Image (cartoon, rainbow, N blue to C red):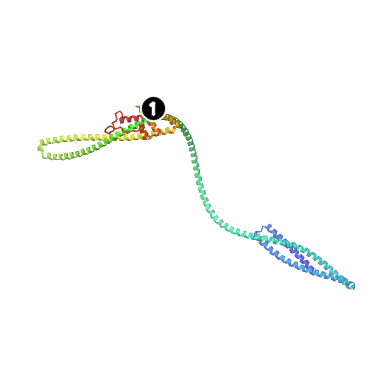
Amino acid sequence: MNTAVNINSGQKTDEEQVNKDSEGEIEDSSNPAENNITAETGLKVVTDTIIHDNALMKEKDEEILHLRDELEQLKVRLDAATKNKNNADDESNTTPDNKDSNLEELSKLREERDHFESQYTTLLSRLSSMKDVFNKMKQSQHELETVQEQLSEYEQQNLRLKKRVDALTYENASLEKTVVSLNTEFDDLNKDIRQKEKQSIKFEFEKEQFDKNVHKMKIEHEKQIEQYERKQNELKKENSQLNSKIEELEVLLNEKSQDLTTLKEEKLYVESNFNALENEKVTLIETIKNLEEEIDTIEDKNKNELNQKTMEVNALRSQLDISTESNQESKLQIESLNDKISKLNDEISQTSRILEESQDRAAQIQKLRHESIILNEHLTKALTMLKQNSESDNVDKELISNLLISFVSIPRGDNRKFEVLQLISNFLNWDDDKRQQAGLIHGPSKDSSGKRKPVSKTESFVSMWTDFLERESEK
């Protein structure tokens, strides 16, 4: 009976403990969700529950072993009771006293049997509940392992987060410093922005003025474009007129080329005269130097004679008649010397005039050279214009044919024949040999003495120069 009471009390305590443990587990599992416990406190709670569950598992294993031993003892006692019952039944047939005692023992044994059966059923129910608890414990242990793995991961993450927190704190400190510097820079930038806004207002005002000026410039530009278009139309008209005047210019260029040949001849003649005048100039300069030396010597002599005569006048006043005659002779000599000096001055003035004329002629020669260069340039430009304006070979053929017809139709002694031939040579780019064969290039005509023939008065330099100026003015 005492063992049965102990077993029932043990069952109750175990069931209460299991219920408490399950309630504790439920409370432990519900508290983190309800109270929002942090990761570290949750891990501590989980570890504590795991340790407590392991201790309970050990206690439950010991209780199960103890209950198994009690069951075996009860089975042994039950077998012994059944044996005693059988013996009692056998003995009951012998004596009535023993029968009563056996009945009492049998009732006791039945009660004990019933009690053991009830204990057995309770133990079976308790074992089933313990199996459920064990299954729950295994599940909780499996969950514990997963939680431990998560805990290790959380610890690693915690270390990483701590390191990151340290780095972030360091970065925060540096960022605070940069924020301070950026605030100062921001203030400076605000000041600059204000200044820039003021400048932008000025620039906007200047931009408006610039836009107005641009609009005005556009209007003026459009007007200028219209003027340029008008001028272009006028230039086209002038170009057509120039194309019509090219033929006239060809004739004039030929005339100028002939004039250039005559001017070259005149230039050679003037150069020869200029050389002769330079030689005369040298001789005149030498004579002037000699005359100046003679004048200086005469003046020195006169000065000496005057000094002597003044001395003689002071010493020989008594001889006035003789001295007067000598004075008259000296006066005659002085007058003759003065006449010579006046003649020399006239010669000097003539030489200066000759020098001026020679300088004028040299300037005229330079002008003629310059004019000849300009005429050659005009001639080459006209030829290039002719070549550029000719759109095809047919134009060149027509022009050459016209020139040949005009060359054949012009009489032999006419100067235009030479001009047409000169045009043909320039247009066809003849070399010197072909020009010499055609009679355009020839040496200067010389007389028997080897000197150049004098130019006639009608073809003198002045007349040729005036004709050239008149032709240029008519252009």
Q: Quadrant of residue 19?
A: bottom right
Residue type at tag 1: Val
* Res. 99 in view: no
Using the image as rendered, state which of residue 378 and residue 391 is in the foreground: 391
Q: How many numbered discs?
A: 1
Q: Quadrant of residue 253?
A: top left
Residue 185 falls left or right of residue 358:
right
Apparent side of residue 217 relative to residue 336 in the rendered image (left or right): right
Q: Nearer the viewer, residue 93 or 247?
A: 247
Foreground: 283 or 43? 283
Residue 421 lies, in percent from the top left, at: 38, 30
Residue 290 visible in the picture: yes
Q: Position of residue 4 (x, y in %)?
A: 79, 68
From what the image shows, is residue 82 above or below residue 271? below
- Percent x, y of residue 90: 88, 71
Quadrant for residue 98, please give it.
Answer: bottom right
Q: Quadrant of the C terminus?
A: top left
Mark 1, secondary structure of its residue:
helix
- Of all residues shown, which one is farthest toward the left? 318
Label 1: which residue? 408
Crowd band around label 1 with a 10 angstrom C-alpha radius: few (<14), some (14–19), many (20+): few
Query: x%, y% of residue 121?
Result: 80, 64
Q: Quarter of the image for the N terminus: give it.
A: bottom right
